[in-house]
Amino acid sequence: LDSRLARARSFDFSIDRAPTDRSRSGSMARSHSLLLPLAALVFLGQRAFIAPRTPGLRSSDARHLVALRAGGNSVSTGLTWPSPEAEAKLREVDGIKLYPTHAWTDQMKPIVPAFKDIGATPVVIGVAADSGCGKSTFLRRILGALGTEVSSGHTAIGDMMTVVCLDDYHTNDRAGRKATGLTALDARENDFALMGAQIEALKNGQAVYKPIYNHDSGFKDPPELLQPNKVMVFEGLHPIYDEKARSQLDLGIYIDIVNDVKFAWKVQRDVQERGWTEQQVRDDINKRLPDFSKYVDPQKANADVILRYEPSDQGLPYLKVKLIQKKGGAFPMIKLKKDLTLKGSKPGATLKMYDQDWYGNDVTVVEMDGEIDMDNMEAQLKMIEENMEGLNAKSKGELTEAMLKLKSSPGSQNGTGL
């Protein structure tokens, strides 16, 4: 892992996003050795939150990091759940209901033996956030750090890490949701029973036939065979929502972007890429807000670590970024020895650490407000790194060196980069 991380740091990965409609995706002890480097993995992935496109990627690198989606001939099942037509085709295997809207083929089983024993219990990580907040792009950066050879297909699979988009567990396709009048954020539009059972099976070393939601066509394609991997990441709207799925996670991460920042980011994306007006972006966010507040946002109370992006005390476009770490949680704690103030350019930056209550949980927060002086970047990064505890670095200056290699990447000047 260390050698792969070192190799990954030498590349500047970027992702071109495929067109989607996603609001535009005993074992603990054995797992601990893989969880320790996750702080480094989060660092490797941070720039992908801010800029899905980063200059400098060679075409030979890009073919391993494409945004994999279902392809080929995609055909609607013509079914909506619930309906008499769908209920007539419902079957059950080993206590698991197989909704026909998932496009199951005859005799297909949801859980089957794996091709081989991977030799250890998989590390299972959940990453939750609203649509359009950079989950998929962020995780493909981590995928590149752990193994750049990605097999072709709907789900991104590296040589030691698999990233599963939980949109695949939407019960209905796009047309079906129009018929029910429910959004994809609504818990009633998601098959949590199947999701929980299959996450548990993969953690136990079994293979599964996982549903596919085709973002290009809006249909549910026939399920794909998915094998267990050393690290299994489940990203989407609800990885921490359901108790069965949540109980299988070794680590839960929540990306918490407050509405003002989310609006600014979505305006930048949707106005440029989709031709929307700012009012259309705001209407879209407001339309989703009730279901987001009811079904998605409460998950941050149960996450081990939260990445929270707020407007700076000096106002947007500057940011205040918080790393909120649950005490006693699975995330390796990062701390500051003392508060810091960095000057030299507007707006400057302040770093501080404090304890607080977070939805009934005791947490330690490391906060950065503002931006470092990019003309004095190396010196200021060294000050920050020397003031940090818990980085688990292999050598002195490793964080500074890694940040300098990506100096031109958006986000390197603020807390999202750090």
Image (cartoon, grey):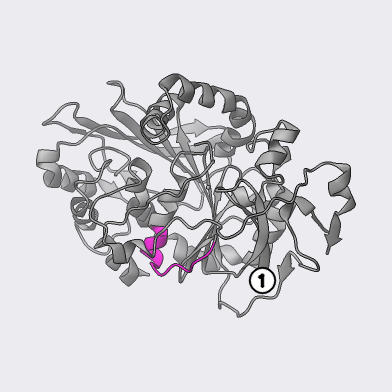
Q: In this view, does 66 lie to the left or right of 118?
A: left
Q: Give the residue at x 43% y 43%.
A: 134
Q: Was residue 151 drawn as part of the magenta stretch in this picture?
A: yes
Q: Which is more toward the observer, 197 or 217?
A: 217
Q: Is mark 1 on a helix, strand or loop?
A: loop
Residue 266 vertical placement versus 30 (above, below): above
Going 89% across and 43% down the picture, which residue do you hit? Answer: 84
Toward the viewer: 360 or 285? 285
Q: Position of residue 327 (x, y in %)?
A: 49, 44
Mark 1 residue type? Gln
327 or 159, nearer to the observer: 159
Direction from residue 20 to residue 309 in the image, left or right:
left
On-image quarter of the C terminus: top left
Quarter occupied by residue 344:
top left
x, y percent for residue 285: 52, 26
Q: In front: 394, or 186?
A: 186
Which contiguous range is marked in magenta? 142-153
Q: Quadrant of residue 228?
A: bottom right
Residue 173 picture location, percent across and down: 68, 45
Indicate the quadrant containing the N terminus: top left, top right, bottom left or bottom right: bottom left
Residue 390 visible in the shown view: no
Q: Where is residue 89 in the image (x, y as percent from the top left)?
A: 86, 54
Check disc 1: other Cα within 10 Å, few if <14, some if 14-19, many if 20+. many
- The residue beneath circle 1 is 206
Residue 81 visible? The answer is yes
